[in-house]
Image (spheres, rainbow, N blue to C red):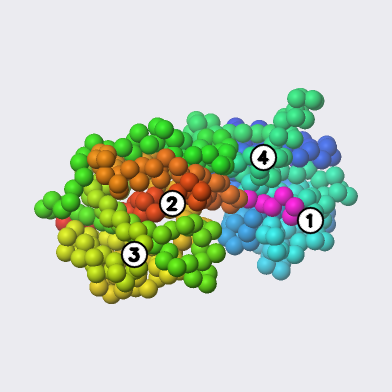
Amino acid sequence: MSFIDSQQINRLHPYQREVALAILNSIFGRKGFTFSVEIARQGGKNELSAQLELLLLTLYMAEPQNLVKCAPTFKPQTVISMIRLKDRLNNAGFNAIWVAELGYIIRLGNARAIFLSADESANVVGNTAHILLEIDESQDVNQGKYTKEFKPMGATTNVTTIHYGTTWDDSTLLEEVKQTNLELERKDGIKRHFRYDWQEVAKYNPDYLTYVEAERERLGENHPLFLTQYRLLPIHSGGGYLSHQQMAQLNGEHTRKHQPDPGKVYIAGIDLAGEAEEEEGARLRALKPRQDSTVVTIGELDFSICSQVIKQPRIKVVEHYWWTGRKHAEVYPQLIDILKNVWHCRKVVVDATGVGQPVASLLRQSLGSRVSPFTFTARSKSGLGFALLAAINSGRLKMYAGDGSPESQESWSEIEKARSQYRPNQTMNFYVDPTQGHDDFLMSLALLVEAASQYTPRGARGSMREE
């Protein structure tokens, strides 16, 4: 059977076939190449992998040989890969022949596909890759784990290895393999690194083009997630959180308000002071350093920009409240009055991390389900930071025009000093270095964006649901 004439391979898009043929050439020629494959998110990486696995199991079904595939987690990533391969086996007419073994092996005849977790705690030593070794989402796999436990699986067989993924920063396993491959290509001219961004994928799929263009409008072309997952360009940690262009986009022309306009919808984001950093203060400071002010940011929602692409309203920051050195018990009555009686806020998201939890509970008792507590963790804060960037990039978030007030000056000072740090597993941190100031206004602004995402119009004629 000629792999070039294989029905499975011919079914793939041209860019997928280019990768498949290079991999199969290495396997059948016993060359033992290591490939790096970057394909834009939802661009067919998993289908390419499944079709390769189907073909190889078919070709080697008479031999007791293994292919091994790992992903950063067993659930859901590895499980999804197993389900896809089972579906392809069934589609190819093998539904009565393939067998599942031990919950992580799919056997066709004597050939096996072994699916493993690359989590640092996973016990994977002892497996051998005879046919192929696949590293899925390689940018999220620990380099030490791969080098010590996965790479040796193919040592005695000179196995062909593939690293699939999307770019992140310049410190990932995928980036390391990519740079090695590019250097080898310069020396011998053999292509080992394959890169297909969203524009290449969209040539063969009009629906994908429509989807990604909508994502670009929603997130902004230079949003870290769009930059890495669709444009396949790496990001660099330690820089400013917002660029000059993004700060210009954030700067609005509307005037600050001290009371609501009739018929408008208002929301709030509240970052609470840390008070006297209690027992777990050291851990919390790592997430939210030097928080000694309580900041309330009031936003007005404008639903006129909502469309098929931009489904969320514009958020106009219209007012700030700022208390420094005040205990929560002292501020609480004012908070209730401001949120309930002055602005009639429909949605409030409040920092409920550590000592903020009791205040969040009291606010919820007084204001009901319109109050949502937000607990800062590394992952939840990352999501908050990405959402804030998306709101700014899409033009949905605007600050009131600078009025020279202390609140305006402090908020812009924090915005200008904010830094970003990108971490493994496509997460980020955004913060103001404690040596340069505080980040209370910045976090309150991010919580305001979260409040907007949680508020939805009730229905048909634009009437708003009371939260």
The answer, for residue 83, to whether it is visible in the render is: no
Residue matched to label 3:
326
The structure residue drawn at horizontal position 45% and vertical position 42%, both measured from the top left corner, is 417
Left or right: 212 as drawn, with respect to 331:
right
Q: In this view, does 136 lie to the left or right of 210?
A: right
- The residue mark sitting in front, 4 or 2, is 2
> How far separated are the C-alphas under marks 1 and 3?
54 Å
Return the x and y of residue 202 as percentages of the image width and height.
49, 33
**SS assignment at label 4:** helix
Find the distance from the CA under tag 1 to the CA under tag 2: 43 Å
> Does residue 15 appear to the left or right of 318 in the view shown?
right
Mark earlier in primary sequence (1, 2): 1
What's under tag 4, amino acid-wise? Glu
Quarter of the figure with the C terminus: bottom left
Q: Earlier in the sequence, mark 3 or mark 2?
A: 3
Magenta region: 140-145
Instruction: Name the amino acid type tagged 1.
Output: Glu
143 inside magenta stretch: yes
Question: Considering only order in the chain, which callout, 2 or 4, is on the residue closer to the N terminus?
Answer: 4
Q: Is residue 205 above or below residue 382?
A: above
Q: Residue 175 carries which label?
A: 4
